[in-house]
């Protein structure tokens, strides 16, 4: 079980993504990639912010939940279309007189997305206890799997495919393996691991920008 | 030597002219003493000079290939910090000694030519360079550097050009309303390189035909043009004197907007359509001939009462006339909103200033002939005259045509004198207003820019002008179809280059 | 997307490489200093020096001659038909003992609108702090005028006054500039060089906003705080190894988002903003969520009794809480064109002050009362509470300024002898300011009883001068000067300062 946290890409050995061209290992991870400082960065840097309606549809589809199941605030208000509409890139022209969506995320955008991801992921985990749909490889009533296990790699692969529409790199798998244990190194529950793994993937910038 | 680029008469000046249009790497360039003096912040002068509203037109006649002038007009801020009181930036200040006290219109072009090689704002780029790139020659903080080439290799993104995978993802997000699935993306990746573009466009076509784009996606683009207000719309809950306060129904506007921008229809109908659009029971949109009776048994708004012969698409719906004209005698707000929404020029921001001689005449005695006001109203008032024949809020009769309205409301009204001028062309009606506007390069640029900026998620910048020009240029041959325009935009580097 | 001015790509790139590590006081106090300060050279993070701005927008056109500059019928000069002017009967005008300012009493006929708090109540309570500034505006288009009311018609590089104050005092605050307003009042300014930290945080629903300030509390599904914190750290690790993260590691949009997420968001959570800003009462919050109402919730209800049902009162309450708790230094709130409802009873007027088109005096009287009730609440709170709860910092009032902005004025005339009339938009008007930093109990400028047009004053002395016209730029300058916000071109308005 890998517990070392990979922090600096210069230190890490990255997996090369031939999967983007089609080659993947049987465990769903990607081959090695060049070192981070050898990877060219974009110079155009034009990113498009994925707005509330796309977030809702993507999450709903990825986690096979109805939009209204994803998240509520205070048990009453829909997170995406009510409580956090504007911070998620929407706008209300009819009542608020906001006739254009905001150009960039707000201070509260990441917090709102955290809330929605925590909720939606947990809803999926709880439903999967009886009818496994996403976390099919996990025993949600038991401890988190081992980092070398198929259950772990399949879960990570499933999350990446559902949420980011690609296979994970080996280095990404290594990072997520840190969620299998707590700060003290003790194994967490499978359900907690599932929720947190789902959460971290959902709230990466790759999910929010395209 | 002057390098003023001559405009090609009658032609849409979208074609870049020679090498000078392309951005060059920044180079060091030291200005003459004249520019140094200008750079030292001479913003206010004691000499009796004024802001000249003919400046933007003169500028664009001199530099038709400046990005500001391609289907648009530069603004007063090219030379001015303020026009009331008149304050100049360093570029404008450098022109003052060359035209001050002389006939402005007769000398400004030569003056601009004479300072082309100088660097008025001291940012290292000559004035002409900045003009042709699209930055402000009078502001050092308005500067652009070309995007450098990526340094090295990237195994996941095609950084040095167009990446179909990136474009595919973005297209799905923007136009289908959801990201591609893993399976879809894998299938796309597996395609031969020379098949990816076709697959991208096939997917895009499906998206554009889908419920998301036809509904939410297009509607959101219409919000700032329609500007709905719930409390006076068809669903209002406000009741007074036993009447629900329905002044008009903006859903007609949304349906018309969505209808015209879908299915390869001609976007010019946004300004020329004589029909309206209803929702059919299956959720689709169906054109209907007007007028449409008021479904409410009240003298308030509802339906579409305007006769077809007076119709000009979106700028003659009941909601548009009600919410913009309201009670005004001369509907300046209406004309300004039409100009802003469909020609992309906001007069309140000194965009699109094309003053008409002997205007403003201040027909309604609002004081707009004062020098500070006339700068804009010399353009705005002639745009508004034709709208004076249309009621705003009127019980009954909101949004109807009334040949007697201007004369009844404005004692000095004289149709022979108060001539409507749109983009320099006299017109006799709002319908004609719409036709002239729809045929203009300004309309094409405005619509192209709307869809372009939506696609790339930001305002257009110097790095985008080439792409924007290219796609706008195709609109005529593409039948002014929004869908085809989107297909063109998706093919641009601005959209598909990571 | 907003039509921004051309901006410096070089400036952005320089800014990104600029002041990493320049923060003083560590991450906690100065989370935003990761990027370059592109703004006010006098920017400060010292709470002792901080000033607070509250912009209260009287949407739709609040007329000063229907509130604090009324003209009595018997003051209209002979020879002028007082019945054709919007002059009030003497018995409808009040002037409290000691007050230099007059006000309009509740009018007898408010149509179907429900009167509430009155101008007279406000005047009686606050005349000593009231500053009335007579001025013109430069647009009668709602959206254009609203924006100009906040930007001073572009006098300060296009910045809104709230943005300018945030750039001066709020660069270390997590939500320096909050905007809950509508239409033109919620539109950002046009200065592309504005520091990121000074940009507006748009708040659509003040009642729910607290929930946006914490990433987990209130969600039953949330893990323990330390567990979530660890997951977030792991997420940052993912960002550094993912193909997307590596490829777009220099993307400014992504970098800003990451910085906000790693620096500002934890600050909001640690400050317990979710509790401090929670406007819902305890009985509206499910017990098991770990969410509590604001400790000052009941205090809000005392002075803003509509907090539990009225968006307008909620805005006022949230604006106070944001400043009190050191989250913000500039808040903008506004009436909306949608009225509130108390059951079936309408609160306020549809279209806010713009209902003056239909019923001028009723709309003005009722809506001024509505605006002033929130201002009254704000003043009471600001005078009662020490800034940041620290007696050493003095009362919040000592450092605050409230600016009641209006779109524009209304027509000064009426059908002869008719008390139930409608009015159009008018450029001539005035604004209301309240602050110990200004000379209170004063009217600057005046009103001509023959025309009901207001006139200006000498900004340096405050002396009324019928030959002077004050406009948006001067009003902006008053506020800026009072709050010690400097900018090129600021007018000298010393005559209004305390």
Image (spheres, coloured by chain):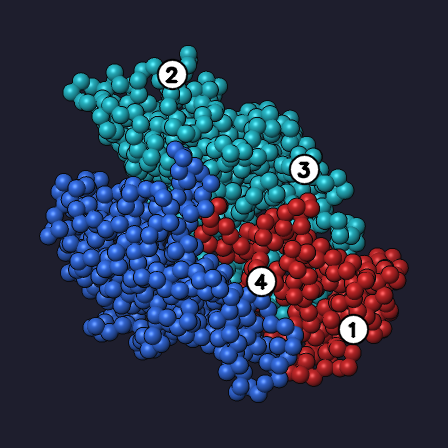
Look at the numbered discs 1 and 3 and tell me whether their residues touch, using CB distance below 8 Å: no
Whether residue B133 is visible to the viewer of this picture, yes or no, is no
Q: Nearer the viewer, residue C160 or C338?
A: C338
Q: Residue at x 22, y 40 (%)?
A: B366
Q: Residue at x 67, y 83 (%)?
A: A22
Could you tell me which chain the residue with mark 2 belongs to? C
- Give neighbour class at mark 2: few <14, some 14-19, many 20+ (Cα, 10 Å): some
Q: Which residue is mark 3?
A: C284
Q: Which residue is mark 1?
A: A154
C263 is higher (above) or lower (below) than B161:
above
Disc number placed over residue A54 in the picture, else none: 4
Could you tell me which chain the residue with mark 1 belongs to? A
Look at the numbered discs 3 and 2 and tell me whether their residues touch, using CB distance below 8 Å: no
Disc number placed over residue B108 in the picture, else none: none
The letter of the red chain is: A
Q: CA distance from mark 4 to mark 2?
A: 56 Å
Q: CA distance from mark 4 to mark 3?
A: 30 Å
Q: Residue at x 72, y 55 (%)?
A: A118
A204 is higher (above) or lower (below) than C68:
below
Image x and y of residue A107, in percent: 59, 50
Q: Which residue is mark 2?
A: C94
């Amino acid at each position: 079980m890998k517990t070392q946290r990979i922090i600096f890409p210069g230190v890490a050995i990255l997996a090369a993504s031939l999967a983007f061209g089609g080659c993947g290992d049987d465990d769903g991870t990607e081959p090695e990639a060049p070192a981070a400082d050898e990877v060219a960065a974009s110079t155009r840097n034009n990113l498009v912010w994925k707005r509330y309606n796309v977030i809702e549809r993507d999450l709903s589809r990825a986690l096979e939940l109805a939009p209204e199941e994803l998240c509520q605030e205070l048990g009453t208000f829909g997170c995406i279309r009510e409580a956090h509409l504007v911070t998620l890139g929407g706008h209300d022209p009819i009542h608020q007189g906001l006739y254009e969506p905001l150009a960039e995320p707000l201070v509260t955008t990441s917090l709102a997305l955290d809330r929605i991801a925590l909720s939606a992921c947990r809803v999926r985990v709880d439903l999967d206890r009886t009818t496994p749909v996403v976390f099919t490889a996990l025993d949600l009533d038991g401890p988190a799997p081992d980092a070398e296990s198929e259950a772990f790699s399949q879960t990570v692969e499933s999350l990446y495919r559902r949420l980011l529409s690609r296979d994970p790199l080996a280095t990404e798998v290594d990072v997520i393996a840190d969620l299998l244990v707590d700060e003290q190194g003790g194994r967490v529950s499978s359900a907690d691991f599932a929720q947190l793994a789902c959460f971290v993937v959902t709230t990466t910038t790759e999910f929010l920008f395209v | 030597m002057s390098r003023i680029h001559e405009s090609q008469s009658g032609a849409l000046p979208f074609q870049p002219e020679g090498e000078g249009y392309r951005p060059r790497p920044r180079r060091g360039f030291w200005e003459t003493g004249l520019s140094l003096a200008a750079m030292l912040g001479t913003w206010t002068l004691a000499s009796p000079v004024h802001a000249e509203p003919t400046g933007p037109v003169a500028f664009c006649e001199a530099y038709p290939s400046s990005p500001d002038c391609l289907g648009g007009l530069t603004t007063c801020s090219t030379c001015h910090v303020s026009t009331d009181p008149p304050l100049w930036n360093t570029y404008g200040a450098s022109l003052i000694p060359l035209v001050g006290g002389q006939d402005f219109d007769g000398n400004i072009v030569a003056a601009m030519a004479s300072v082309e090689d100088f660097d008025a704002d001291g940012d290292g780029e000559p004035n002409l360079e900045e003009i042709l790139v699209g930055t402000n020659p009078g502001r050092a903080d308005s500067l652009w550097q070309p995007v450098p080439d990526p340094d090295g290799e990237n195994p996941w993104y095609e950084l040095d050009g167009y990446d179909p995978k990136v474009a595919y993802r973005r297209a799905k997000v923007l136009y289908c309303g959801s990201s591609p699935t893993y399976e879809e993306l894998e299938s796309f990746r597996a395609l031969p390189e020379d098949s990816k573009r076709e697959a991208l466009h096939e997917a895009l076509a499906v998206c554009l035909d889908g419920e998301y784009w036809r509904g939410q996606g297009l509607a959101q683009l219409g919000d700032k043009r329609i500007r709905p207000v719930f409390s006076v719309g068809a669903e209002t809950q406000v009741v007074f004197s036993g009447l629900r306060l329905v002044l008009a129904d903006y859903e007609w506007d949304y349906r018309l907007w969505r209808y015209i921008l879908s299915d390869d229809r001609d976007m010019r109908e946004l300004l020329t359509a004589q029909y309206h659009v209803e929702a059919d029971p299956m959720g689709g949109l169906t054109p209907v001939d007007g007028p449409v009776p008021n479904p409410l048994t009240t003298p308030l708004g509802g339906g579409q009462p305007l006769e077809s012969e007076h119709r000009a698409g979106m700028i003659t719906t009941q909601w548009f006339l009600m919410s913009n004209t309201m009670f005004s005698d001369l509907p300046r707000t209406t004309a300004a909103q039409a100009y802003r929404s469909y020609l992309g020029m906001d007069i309140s921001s000194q965009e699109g200033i094309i003053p008409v001689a002997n205007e403003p005449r201040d027909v309604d005695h609002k004081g707009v002939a004062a020098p500070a006001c006339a700068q804009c109203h010399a353009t705005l008032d002639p745009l508004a005259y034709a709208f004076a024949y249309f009621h705003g809020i009127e019980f009954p009769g909101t949004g109807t045509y009334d040949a007697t309205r201007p004369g009844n409301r404005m004692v000095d009204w004289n149709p022979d004198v108060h001539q409507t001028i749109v983009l320099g062309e006299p017109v006799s009606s709002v319908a004609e207003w719409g036709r002239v506007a729809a045929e203009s390069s300004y309309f094409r640029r405005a619509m192209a820019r709307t869809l372009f900026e939506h696609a790339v998620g930001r305002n257009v910048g110097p790095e985008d002008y080439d792409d924007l020009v290219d796609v706008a240029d195709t609109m005529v041959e593409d039948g002014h179809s929004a869908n085809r325009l989107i297909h063109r935009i998706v093919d641009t580097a601005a959209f598909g280059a990571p | 997307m907003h039509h921004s001015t051309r901006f410096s790509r070089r400036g952005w790139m320089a800014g990104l490489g600029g002041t990493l590590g320049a923060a003083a006081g560590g991450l906690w106090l100065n989370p935003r200093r990761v990027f370059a300060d592109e703004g006010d050279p006098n920017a400060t993070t010292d709470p002792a020096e901080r000033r607070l701005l509250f912009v209260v927008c009287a949407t739709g056109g609040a007329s000063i001659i229907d509130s604090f500059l009324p003209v009595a019928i018997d003051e209209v000069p002979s020879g002028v038909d007082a019945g054709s002017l919007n002059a009030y009967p003497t018995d409808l005008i009040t002037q409290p003992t000691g007050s230099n300012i007059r006000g309009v009493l509740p009018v007898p006929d408010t149509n179907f609108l429900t009167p509430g708090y009155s101008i007279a109540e406000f005047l009686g309570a606050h005349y000593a702090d009231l500053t009335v500034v007579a001025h013109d505006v430069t647009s009668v288009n709602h959206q254009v005028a609203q924006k100009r009311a906040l930007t001073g018609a572009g006098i300060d590089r296009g910045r809104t006054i709230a943005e300018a104050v945030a750039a001066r005092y709020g660069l270390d605050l997590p939500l320096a500039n909050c905007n809950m307003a509508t239409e033109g009042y919620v539109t950002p300014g046009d200065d592309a060089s504005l520091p990121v930290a000074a940009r507006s945080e748009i708040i659509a629903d003040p009642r729910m906003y607290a929930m946006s300030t914490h990433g987990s509390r209130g969600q039953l599904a949330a893990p323990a705080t330390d567990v979530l914190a660890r997951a977030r750290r792991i997420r940052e690790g993912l960002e550094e190894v993912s193909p997307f993260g590596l490829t777009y590691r220099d993307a400014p949009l992504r970098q800003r988002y990451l910085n906000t997420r790693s620096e500002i968001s934890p600050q909001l959570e640690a400050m317990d903003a979710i509790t401090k800003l929670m406007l819902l009462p305890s009985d509206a919050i499910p017990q098991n969520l770990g969410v509590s109402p604001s400790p000052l919730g009941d205090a809000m209800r005392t002075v803003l009794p509509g907090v539990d049902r009225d968006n307008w009162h909620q805005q006022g309450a949230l604006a106070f809480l944001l400043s009190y708790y050191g989250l913000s230094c500039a808040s903008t709130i506004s009436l909306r064109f949608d009225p509130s409802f108390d059951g079936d009873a309408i609160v306020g007027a549809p279209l806010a002050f713009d209902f003056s088109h239909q019923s001028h005096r009723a709309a003005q009287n009722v809506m001024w009362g509505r605006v002033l009730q929130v201002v009254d609440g704000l003043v009471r709170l600001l005078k009662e509470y020490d800034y940041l709860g620290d007696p050493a910092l003095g009362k919040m009032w000592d450092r605050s300024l409230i600016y009641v902005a209006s779109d524009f004025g209304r027509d000064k005339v009426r059908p002869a002898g008719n008390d139930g009339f409608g009015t159009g938009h008018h450029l001539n008007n005035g604004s209301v300011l309240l602050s110990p930093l200004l000379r209170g109990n004063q009217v600057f400028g005046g009103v001509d009883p023959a025309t009901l047009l207001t006139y200006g004053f000498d900004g340096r002395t405050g002396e009324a001068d019928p030959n002077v016209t004050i406009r948006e730029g001067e009003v902006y300058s008053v506020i800026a000067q009072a709050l010690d916000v400097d900018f090129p071109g600021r007018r000298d308005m010393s005559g209004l300062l305390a």
